[in-house]
Image: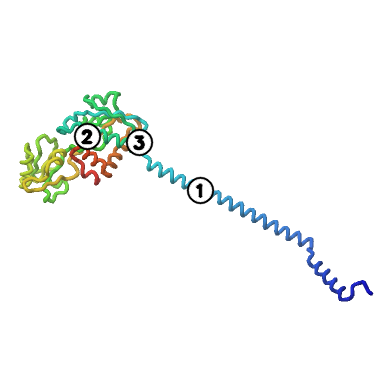
């Protein structure tokens, strides 16, 4: 018996060896392939690092932009902050305002308006009611400002800042509802009436000015076109029944003069006082626009002399 491989088996073994040899790598080729793999891995790592870098950079750019936008919006919506505490006085007698029996009503209304605006605008105020001579007292260190319907001397305006009126008391022009007049200056060359006690000089040239003591007589003449316009105080005009002698009347806007109860403060510090007054006027405008002002007028049973202010 022959124990060695036969011819066919021998050929198979050779073929297997050849296949195995073919599978073996050439050292040079293997080194080259390893280099290529290492290079590919290095490029992949660098790409990952770049991607990571750009992701990080983009993240901070976007985050910074969002943070900046948030701070800008916050500053825009945040009311002006004035650290100074303002001591505000008012004369509870309201001289020359012709409020009749509603002096206490006006005092309560004014307090509510001031404290409401202060709360909304982040202002700090303390209110004092007094019967002192306010313009004189304002020269002292006791008060920073006062709420008044009194007019100051023109020269004093350099030292004071004035708010828009909280309550309009200035003169207005009343005309027949059927007339075509829209603004007061259109009454140039016409015959006008003026209620006694109203201090106002019409700027336009007119034909004639008739003074009236009787409101009824003035309205009668206006209805009959004996006069084309009637100048009277805002409180009197808005408080009267605008329907006389079968004719309906209307009040032209704006008032002929902005006179009324307003806040006056000393202009003592850089920006602080101006910021305070700007915030105060903004708060008053908001109350007029959202209807809160007119609700308080009704609450304290006062005549609304600023109904058109909500539209401006």
Q: Residue at x 17, y 29 (%)?
A: 95
Dot 2: element? strand
Residue neighbourhood size for the residue with mark 1, other residues' Cα within 10 Å, grouped as few (<14), some (14–19), many (≥20): few
Q: Quadrant of the C terminus?
A: top left
Q: Quadrant of residue 92?
A: top left
Report the residue marked by disc 2: 261
**Near-viewer residue (6 or 254):** 6
272 left or right of 150? right
Q: Residues within 10 Å of mark 3 (few under 14, many from 20)?
A: some
- Residue at image mark 1: 61
At label 2, counting other C-alpha atoms closer than 10 Å, the crowd grade (few under 14, some 14-19, many 20 or more) is many
Residue at 60 percent of width and 52 percent of height? 50
Name above or below for residue 175 compared with residue 3: above
Q: Please name the residue shown 38% across and 40% down the image.
A: 78
Residue highlighted by disc 3: 122
Residue 177 shows in the view: yes
Nearer the camera: disc 1 or disc 2: 2
**Residue 94 x, y percent position in the rendering:** 19, 30
């Amino acid at each position: 018996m022959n124990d060695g491989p036969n011819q066919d088996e021998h050929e198979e073994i050779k073929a297997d060896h050849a296949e195995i040899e073919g599978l073996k790598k050439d050292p040079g080729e293997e080194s080259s392939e390893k280099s290529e793999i290492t290079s590919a891995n290095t490029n992949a790592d660098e790409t990952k690092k770049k991607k990571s870098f750009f992701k990080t950079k983009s993240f901070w750019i976007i985050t910074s932009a969002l943070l900046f936008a948030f701070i800008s919006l916050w500053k825009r919506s945040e009311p002006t902050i004035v650290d100074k505490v303002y001591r505000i006085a008012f004369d509870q007698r309201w001289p020359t305002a012709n409020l009749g029996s509603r002096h206490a009503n006006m005092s309560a209304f004014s307090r509510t308006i001031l404290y409401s605006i202060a709360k909304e605008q982040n202002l700090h105020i303390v209110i004092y009611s007094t019967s002192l001579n306010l313009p004189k007292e304002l020269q002292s260190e006791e008060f920073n400002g006062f709420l008044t319907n009194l007019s100051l001397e023109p020269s004093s305006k350099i030292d004071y800042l004035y708010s828009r009126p909280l309550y309009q008391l200035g003169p207005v022009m009343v005309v027949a509802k059927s007339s075509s007049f829209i603004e007061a200056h259109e009454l140039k060359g016409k015959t006008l009436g003026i209620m006694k006690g109203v201090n106002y000089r019409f700027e336009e040239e007119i034909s004639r000015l008739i003074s009236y003591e009787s409101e009824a007589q003035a309205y009668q003449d206006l209805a009959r076109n004996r006069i084309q316009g009637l100048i009277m105080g805002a409180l009197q005009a808005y408080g009267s029944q605008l329907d006389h002698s079968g004719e309906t009347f209307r009040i032209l806007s704006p008032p002929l003069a902005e006179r009324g109860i307003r806040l006056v403060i000393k202009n003592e510090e850089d920006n602080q006082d101006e910021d305070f007054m700007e915030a105060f006027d903004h708060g008053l405008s908001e109350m007029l626009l959202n209807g809160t002002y007119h609700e308080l007028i009704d609450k304290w049973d006062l005549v609304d002399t600023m109904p058109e202010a909500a539209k401006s």
